[in-house]
Amino acid sequence: MTTRTSMEDTGEVVWHEDDHISVLTASANYDFAAESVDGGKASFTGLVTETDASSDVAKYAVYPYTKGLSLNGSTVSGIVIPDEQHFSEISGTSVSFAQNTNPSIGSVSADNQIMFYNLCGLVRVKINTQSSITKITLRGKQNEAIAGTGAADAASEAPAWTAAAAKQSIVLTKADASAFAADGVTFTFVVAPVTFENGLEIILENDQNGAYTWTSGKNITINRAKYKSFEITAKAGDFEEVVPMPENAWSYYYGADGNCLLVKPGQTSGTLDVQPYVVRTDCKITSERYPAPKAKGCKVLWTETGLSLDAAVSDDYKTLTVSNITGYGNASVAIYADADCSGDILWSYHIWVPEVDPTVGLLEYTVDHTGDGSISAPAVRNYQLMPMYLGATKIANKESSEEDRLASIGCYYQWGRKDPLGRPSNFINGQLKFRSTEGTDWPETMRAEIVEGATGALDLVSIDYTIKNPDHFITIPDKEWPENDPDLYLAWTGMQNTNLWGNPTDNYTFVTGKSCYDPCPKGYRVAAADTWWNVTSHHWLSGNADEILSDTSLSEIKDLGFNYLYAGKENTDKTDFYVVTGSRDHRGGGSVWSEIAVFSSGLSCDDSQPDYVAEGFFVGWVAHPRFPYPMSDGNCIRCVKYEE
């Protein structure tokens, strides 16, 4: 009989004197030990019951002996392909897989002969490196099942192992876990038969806490009872520091420089940090590295007509460079774990190229909460607000042309999301007319979708969906207010997550910071809800504020906007024009044109509306700084300066 227990340097597979096999009947799993060994052949002995010893009883065998195996007909379950594999010593130029690593299966004949058949294939890796290696890991780029516990038909001459509890990677180490010299040595992995459609990765880790990842080509097939060979060369400088898994990590992000790259007039390029960092449940920006996939590729997802640019990831996968920028407008660039951008989006960035510098002429604004009992220290808040919406290309006033007023409208955002969701090209109520983009129209790329299975106060299902689909607007169907479960109404996350835009304590609309999902450029964040409080704190600014409400006709509002006193009644010379932005409706993603709505980072002060957020500013006939608005509507944003 033959089997696969270990492999000599010559490539011949041999038995060991201390090998054991399982002999199975319908009623028992017997342990048989090797009695004599002759290379690829061996004799085994064991004790069975008198009943099972009969030649009339079907018997099957599995190498190695494994407790917990079970037999159903001729199918054996509980067969293990180890995801942790070891070797003892390096002898010569190749290393065998360890004893009890490579499972095989067969049926026992009437005269007690067994022909074993391999269940696995072999991956042989020749390594050329001067580094001392501590660990070699093999995995597929699509997390294919390559090890674990499964079942196979022992009566088949070409048995196929089917995973029941799969493992997606295999780690090979020395048995005593010590470092080893690997230069010129070929190592062997025992792998479940599989096709790696996007290729496989082999990671070498050395004794200096460094790691080097080698990637194969696509469509690599590992066949049963066959081997596939690879060769890897890694110089000392190829090894990068291994980032350990942080404690209490919730997720990770790639936006250390912010999720928006602001390109000011005169600039033609810019860079962003695209390394992965930790996200915890408070969603605060951190500088703590996370062992997530590196950004090896990037792609321009869309650009508004009139803007063009190029994008590339650095050779060390740490920096995204946007270059050759011409024109004005908005664009989106995504990063991927694959150089060919074939997998899911890891993260995406808004590229904002306005015709004017939004950091010039910041509106100085002070809010004094002294004595109102609503906030502890500091009671006086000083804000410096950008004079234009995020994503706008111009600054307009009430005398501006319609073209300039349209250019002064920013991008729409669903509350808590980092990516822009379109910018209107006209003032048509009820119609979703977006500025055209290179290669595709907005109505096709901005698909309204409902995320299924999205539940939970901190819902990574929906958040993960928006990261992978940054141009999809999530809709919430119109329905009556659910009395027993209001949390699932109008929140694209499934439930309200107050930290997504940096509100660390529920229902305090002014205690805010910058979160990892904040859409504003570096140095700025979404404005706090109290930014606009003084707009309404003086009885609609009546008396000496003749210029505040420039028009009150709803038909004129649709085509114009409002001038508002910005720093309070006592400073009537400080006004700011808010063009009518409209909004995207949460029920279907269509546009509504009778209002100005500016999302703030604050949330509703009413616990009965946990999925509503406070508008910094809402205008129909009147202004209201804390008008409750659904998280799933799409509205514009003003950014305030933020010391990071």
Image (cartoon, helix red, strand yellow):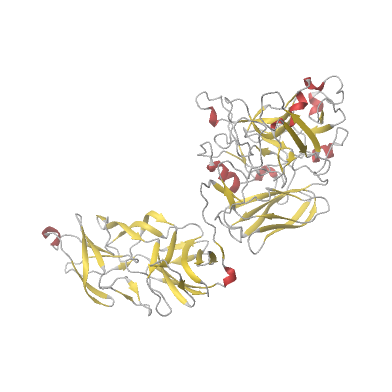
Q: Which corner quadrant of the image does residue 462 belong to?
A: top right
Q: Is residue 544 left or right of residue 602?
A: right
Question: Residue 355 in the image: x percent, y percent?
Answer: 83, 47
Q: Is residue 590 visible?
A: no
Observer-nearest residue: 441 or 615? 615
Quadrant in the picture for the N terminus: bottom left
Q: Residue at position x 53%, y 75% from top?
A: 130
- Looking at the image, the residue that sits furthest to the front is 377
Q: With respect to residue 602, does 420 lie above or below? A: below
Circle count: 0
**Percent x, y of residue 602:** 66, 33
Residue projecting furthest to the left: 50
Q: Is residue 75 above or below residue 468?
A: below
- Quarter of image, res 607: top right
Q: Looking at the picture, tell me which residue is in the foreground, 232 or 589.
A: 232
User: Do we see residue 383 in this rendering?
Assistant: yes
Q: In this rendering, would 280 be left or right of 223?
A: right
Where residue 412 appears, x then y in whole percent? Answer: 70, 39
Quadrant position of residue 552: top right
- Which of these two is toward me, 136 or 449? 136
Residue at 28%, 62% in the rendered image:
154
Tell me the residue at 37%/77% (across/down): 11
Would you say 151 lies left or right of 55 here? right
Q: Position of residue 133 (x, y in %)?
A: 48, 70
Depicted 6 relative to depicted 252: above or below: below
